[in-house]
Image (spheres, coloured by chain):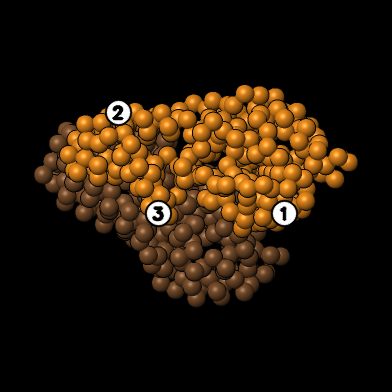
Chain colours: A brown, B orange
Amino acid sequence: MSITIAFDADDTLWHNETLFAVTSEQIGTLLAPYADAENLHRRLIDTERRNLKLFGYGVKGFTLSMIESAIEVSEGRVSAREIQEILEAGKKLLAHPIELLPQVRESLESLSKHHNLMMITKGDLFHQESRIAMSGLGELFSAVEIVSEKNPETYRKILHRYHIDAEDFVMVGNSVKSDILPVLEVGGRTIHIPYEITWELEVAELGSPDPARCRRCHSISQVAEEVARFYPSV
Amino acid sequence: MSITIAFDADDTLWHNETLFAVTSEQIGTLLAPYADAENLHRRLIDTERRNLKLFGYGVKGFTLSMIESAIEVSEGRVSAREIQEILEAGKKLLAHPIELLPQVRESLESLSKHHNLMMITKGDLFHQESRIAMSGLGELFSAVEIVSEKNPETYRKILHRYHIDAEDFVMVGNSVKSDILPVLEVGGRTIHIPYEITWELEVAELGSPDPARCRRCHSISQVAEEVARFYPSV
């Protein structure tokens, strides 16, 4: 029996949300003359949520939402130079080097000797492709899928496309909403590795899932042992 | 023998570049106090070209480049309200309904009875998926590939992925740079259907390609007859 282990990328293989948080904070400082930090943060999250169905995920949509929020909270008083700083912050995010999480390369190399590895990430196609190239991890995966949304239908399509039985599929990721719940729904197994922070629009309750189908661990280095528990006879 | 006919989407199946042109013109009018139209247009194209390797293709990158150009040409004098108008123009582009080119649905329906049809489009994953859904054409294609760049390597990968022999592959599109030259390079056949305008960053010279491998026509309704010329024995 061949097991496929699929990995989320952002905040599972490399740092992502912390970079967004640092950028949001810098922009908060920039816009401090117009709004207090808490108000600004709420407005930004509201704007992002409202724009998500038009922009989808990713840095470019985030930057546009930041600019929109800056104009809103300042009631049109934000200067062109300040908007330019927001633009530059967005570009810095796009160009930011990849910082792998601890033990990622070693763990993937070791897992790839015994299992079929995939990457399933959501977000901006162009930016995710550049990041995968920058990460140097690409050749460890037999397939890379960049998707616009991670819902049960997305996972069903991928399993179908690669002729994978849900029983033989394990998804590893940090997001309960995107990596865990939809995979459990289609009959796969999951390993949840929480990241230090979660984007507010990704927060979801896991409840008490069946430990035979969903495990939690704190490092990618523990994935091999969790997979061995899922499939004791492999 | 089964022939695969792959279609580009923007400016081949539905209007696209004309919408960008109208938006650019509106923004030109908005920024007329700061720069003459010709200067503004040049600056925008330069900004887009410079940002392409960071933003990739699509409306969100276009909007960010528009904002950047507005700040540049106005030397920081553009107001927050004017930037907001640029943002709104970008959002309007994203939400714009799909307008199919003439005879697209009938031609695809007829072709799909005898051939395997694919869609191969570049650009923003999220936006292209929404447009494909809006177009109502999705079910006519056996596969849809949204790619970040259309170069020979992209086409090679797609042919490999779907086990298609380049000899049995015809690409139909409006862009010499993206739909014709790279496909000829990998050994496929092509049908060029020029669109009324071409984005400056897509302009390329076709030269005098072998008419046995590359045809030009003026409407998608002529594709069936060109394909029959390519494969007289089918």
Whether tag 1 and tag 2 are in contact, CB under 8 A, the answer is no
Hey, what amino acid is under mark 2? Thr
Whether tag 2 and tag 3 are in contact, CB under 8 A, the answer is no
The residue tagged 2 is B29
Place residue A165 in its image quadrant.
Answer: bottom right
Q: Earlier in the sequence, mark 2 or mark 3?
A: 2
Task: Locate residue B77, reporting x and y percent.
Answer: 17, 39
> Do the dots labelled 3 and 1 sit on one chain?
yes
- Name the chain under label 1: B
Q: Is residue A230 above or below residue B125?
A: below
Q: Is residue A72 above or below residue A194?
A: above
Q: Which of the pair A34/B153 is nearer the observer? A: B153
The residue tagged 3 is B54
Hey, what amino acid is under mark 3? Leu
Specify few, some or many for label 3: CA neighbours under 10 Å numbering under 14, 14-19, or 20 or more. some
Residue at image point 28% right, 48% down: A87
